[in-house]
Amino acid sequence: MLKLPSITAARGPAALHDRTTFAPGMARSQISCLRSTRAANVHPQTAFTSGAMAPRMRTSTTLAPTRRSIQPLTCRASLTEAAPGKTVLGFVGIGIMGLAMTRNLLKAGYEVVVWNRNPDKCKPLADEGAKVASTPREVAAAATYTFAMLSDPEAALEVATRPDGVAAGLAPGKGYVDVSTVDAATSRAVAAAVRGAGAAFLEAPVSGSKGPAEQGKLIFLTAGDQALFTAVSAPLDVMGKAKFFLGQEGAGANMKLVVNMVMGSMMTSFAEGLALADKVGLRQQDVIEVVGLGAIAAPMFALKGPSMAARSYGPAFPLKHQQKDMRLALALGDEVAQPLPMAAAANSLYIAARRQGLGDADFSAVMEAVAAQQQQQQ
Ligand SMILES: NC(=O)C1=CN([C@@H]2O[C@H](COP(=O)(O)OP(=O)(O)OC[C@H]3O[C@@H](n4cnc5c(N)ncnc54)[C@H](OP(=O)(O)O)[C@@H]3O)[C@@H](O)[C@H]2O)C=CC1
Ligand SMILES: O=CCCC(=O)O
């Protein structure tokens, strides 16, 4: 039987205060930092309050005998709640999503320091008031809270841990919020590097694409240090319409992979339906309308259907990232011995689309892999 973690949902600042659970007696803006001198050996109880560990937070200053080999209590840091005009924010990874998210932070009045591997992508933000740093370390050193929106696990780990990476600029009192879509193991490795610097970590992958990012309507699937979740609630509310705190790091990453696996399979199924309709002489426009009126109506079909019928795939969510998410979801299924035959079949189509050179197109371009297979059968 599947065991699902309990979910704390917060929709907007008012609901957050009602629904978010905190360690008893713990000030929302304060946490204790019990830091090991050996980053790799930080035990959850000695680190920032982390998801399910939160209720034990206030009693963990005394380490259990079996934990005595770990260096106790070398720092005590507070996290202040972020507010425009008061808190400097950092953002690394100015791609499709990072650009839109940073814009919203600037519009809300935050001072933002940005970095991107290709510095040209920072120019529009510089024109809108962002400061541009030359390394991720500089961003983390200048900002209280740094966000990252990077393409994949390799990029997320590299940007966090390289010698001039984010962790090198972090310190107690700061936090790192990684909103990239990665697997749980990568997220835990990034968390260890961040906590090794005495800072707090939150994974916060997002549901929602370019449009919702531009409109500040993303859905954050967070896990990790709950105090950081609280501290960055205001900027999360600027960028999103809902946020979930799911527990220890890994839970947010897994939730995101589950959601994107479903989305990826839905898209291939929809593409097959449109292709079949075309083959039997139905108008794709009619299929989109019928689907939109019935029980399988979905915003994604309504949004992508017309451009798929026109075979136009301007990227909102690049196909290479959807295929990465299918790959990571399948690996997760593998880890827990969960067969995922539908996702595996969908993944093959995304791989085929990549082989057709469509990795940078929108993921709805999987339609072209379906069409190519249809032609091969003729
Ligand atoms: N687009 C979407 O609809 C959504 C995307 N996501 C996820 O968000 C993340 C980003 O997506 P998106 O903005 O669309 O993707 P983009 O491809 O537009 O941006 C990727 C970013 O990662 C950077 N990057 C890649 N490799 C490295 C590296 N080795 N070192 C440093 N930086 C690197 C890129 O830098 P450079 O510009 O120099 O290449 C760029 O800033 C992905 O994990 C994706 O799965 C989540 C929800 C929705
Ligand atoms: O990871 C991408 C998600 C795209 C979406 O939720 O529309």
Image (spheres, rainbow, N blue to C red):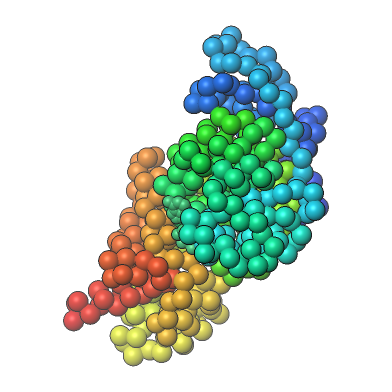
Q: Is residue 369 above or below residue 193?
A: below
Q: Nearer the viewer, residue 274 or 207?
A: 207
In this orientation, does residue 6 appear?
Answer: no
Which of the 4 image quarters holds residue 226? Answer: top right
- Which residue occupies the extreme front position in the image? 134
Q: Which of 81 and 349 is in front in this view?
A: 81
Number of numbered discs overlaid on the protein picture? 0
Q: Position of residue 150 (x, y in %)?
A: 50, 53
In this picture, residue 234 sits left or right of residue 223: right
Q: Is residue 32 above or below residue 297?
A: above
Q: Where is residue 3 in the image (x, y as percent from the top left)?
A: 51, 40
Q: Where is residue 365 in the image (x, y as percent from the top left)?
A: 38, 73
Q: In this view, does 155 lie above or below 103?
A: above
Residue at 65%, 20% (x, y): give it.
74
Residue at 59%, 52% (x, y): give it.
133
Q: Which of 205 and 127 is in front in this view?
A: 127
Residue at 56%, 16% (x, y): give it.
70
In this orientation, does residue 84 appear?
Answer: yes
Q: Quadrant of the C terminus?
A: bottom left
In this picture, residue 67 sits left or right of residue 330: right
Q: Nearer the viewer, residue 368 or 135?
A: 135
- Which residue occupies the extreme top position in the image? 65
Residue at 61%, 12% (x, y): give it.
64
Q: Position of residue 251 (x, y in %)?
A: 54, 42
Which of the 4 image quarters holds residue 175? Answer: top right
In this picture, residue 291 sits left or right of residue 53: left
